[in-house]
Image (cartoon, rainbow, N blue to C red):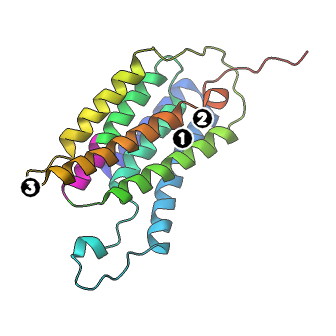
Amino acid sequence: MPTLLVGIAVIAAVTLVRRCWWQGCAAAGVVMATLGSKELTRMILPRPDLVGAHVSLTEPSFPSGHVAIPAGLALGAALIASPRIRPYVTAVGMLWLAVTAGAVQATYHHRPSDVLGSTLLACACYSLAARLLPPAAAPDVTRRPRALPAIALALSAAGALVAGARDDSVTQSLVFAAAAFLCAALFWFTTAEDPAHTACRTRPALG
């Protein structure tokens, strides 16, 4: 809850400073929609009652709330960031997401399906918000540095490996790291498809 409140406060502050009201509302909507859909999905899709199974396999934990918060906040930050720093905000967000997703699996709070489910929900909310945004009026669009995607993905992979590691099972550690890295990759490719609506540019007039 403190992370969520601080994140929303930062989104509100950046919105006020940049005066990007539509993007700010969309960013807040992404956070709220991610958390709301997480709760709704958890109620609709309960875990099956497996006979003799460990409590970690039957406790309702899909999708992960621990992952939904960083995913929603990072995607919201990508919506309100200026075009110049947006690639770096995205890189930091995907690293945060990878480490969180790996850690909650390594501590057996969540399974790979839980973290992937939350990431998919957040990415779906972001994609919807990006498409509903009206064209904005600032034309300063900047391209991502060529080396940044490779660096961000490499750092996310390293963070996922470290956060998802366990001493008792190499196989589980690799599975957890792979799921966490996939969350980061989904995050990156989702934010890479939004130039028309979130980069604050003006569409050229026809003719």
Specify whether residue 104 is painted magenta. Answer: yes
- The residue under the point 56% across, 48% down is 125
| Residue 191 higher or lower than 82, as above or below | below
- The residue under the point 34% across, 41% down is 181
Considering the numbered disc 3 on the image, is that residue within a helix, a strand or a loop? loop
Disc 1: which residue: 27
Q: CA distance from mark 1 to mark 2?
A: 6 Å
Q: Residues within 10 Å of mark 1 (few under 14, many from 20)?
A: many
- The residue under the point 34% across, 22% down is 151
Q: CA distance from mark 2 to mark 3?
A: 45 Å
Considering the numbered disc 1 on the image, is that residue within a helix, a strand or a loop? helix
Residue 23's label in the rendered image is 2
Q: Is residue 156 left or right of residue 103?
A: right
Q: Does the residue at mark 1 contact the one at mark 2 (Cβ under 8 Å)?
A: yes
Residue 166 percent across, percent down from the top left: 13, 50
Q: Amino acid at mark 1?
A: Ala
Q: Residues within 10 Å of mark 2 (few under 14, many from 20)?
A: many
Q: Amino acid at mark 3?
A: Asp
Comparing labels 2 and 3, the label whose residue is closer to the camera: 3
**Which contiguous range is marked in magenta?**
99-107
Quadrant of the rendering where the C terminus is positioned: top right
Residue 69's label in the rendered image is none
Disc 3: which residue: 168
Res 199 visible: yes
Considering the numbered disc 2 on the image, is that residue within a helix, a strand or a loop? helix
Q: Amino acid at mark 2?
A: Gln
Q: Count how many numbered circles sit on residues in the image.
A: 3
Q: Is residue 81 left or right of residue 106?
A: right
Q: Earlier in the sequence, mark 1 or mark 3?
A: 1
Q: Does the residue at mark 2 contact the one at mark 3 (Cβ under 8 Å)?
A: no
Q: Name the magenta segment's main secondary structure.
A: helix
Return the residue nearer the eye: 76 or 167: 167
